[in-house]
Amino acid sequence: MRLSSPEMLRATMARRGFSMSRLARYAGCSKSMVGHLASGHKTSCTPDLAVRIAEALDVPTELLFMPNASTPRRRNDNMAVSR
């Protein structure tokens, strides 16, 4: 899932009194992962981790994360196999 904004994550952590270490411990991930998300160096994570982070911070997942946009696959007719 894609992080809505690093600023929102940091603000939510601050409001809830969470350090990066504490959030990592509650969400079951590394402190560096939380740090990368909070700094904007990483912009996405697995859906499972997104849910755990939101639950740890006691906020709806949608406040912090949005689903990754999937790119529809286009059929390439020029490469169709003839039988």
Image (spheres, helix red, strand yellow):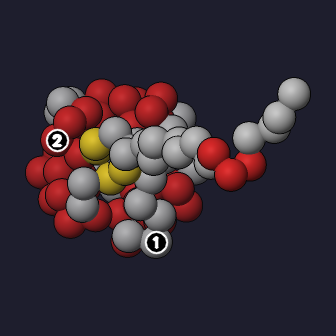
Q: How far apart are the two marked residues, 2 and 1, measured between alpha carbons? A: 19 Å
Q: Earlier in the sequence, mark 2 or mark 1?
A: 1
Residue 62's x, y, as percent?
A: 20, 36
Mark 1, residues whose alpha carbon is within 10 Å: few (<14), some, or many (≥20)? few
In the displayed orientation, state which residue is furthest to the right: 83
**Left or right: 40 in relation to 46:** left
Q: Which residue is mark 2?
A: 63
Residue 76's x, y, as percent?
A: 62, 48
Residue visible at 81% across and 37% down in the picture: 81
Q: Residue 54 sits in which quadrant?
A: top left
The secondary element bearing badge 1 is classed as: loop
Can residue 61 be seen by looking at this rendering?
yes
Residue 56's x, y, as percent?
A: 32, 32
Above or below: residue 40 compared with residue 74: below
Q: Which mark is residue 41?
A: 1
Can residue 23 be seen by looking at this rendering?
no
Image quadrant containing the C terminus: top right
In the displayed orientation, state which residue is furthest to the front: 83
Residue visible at 35% across and 63% down in the picture: 38
Residue visible at 63% across and 45% down in the picture: 77
Residue visible at 74% across and 49% down in the picture: 79
Residue 47's x, y, as percent?
A: 45, 33
- Mark 1 residue type: His
- Mark 2 residue type: Leu
Q: Residue 53 sits in which quadrant?
A: top left
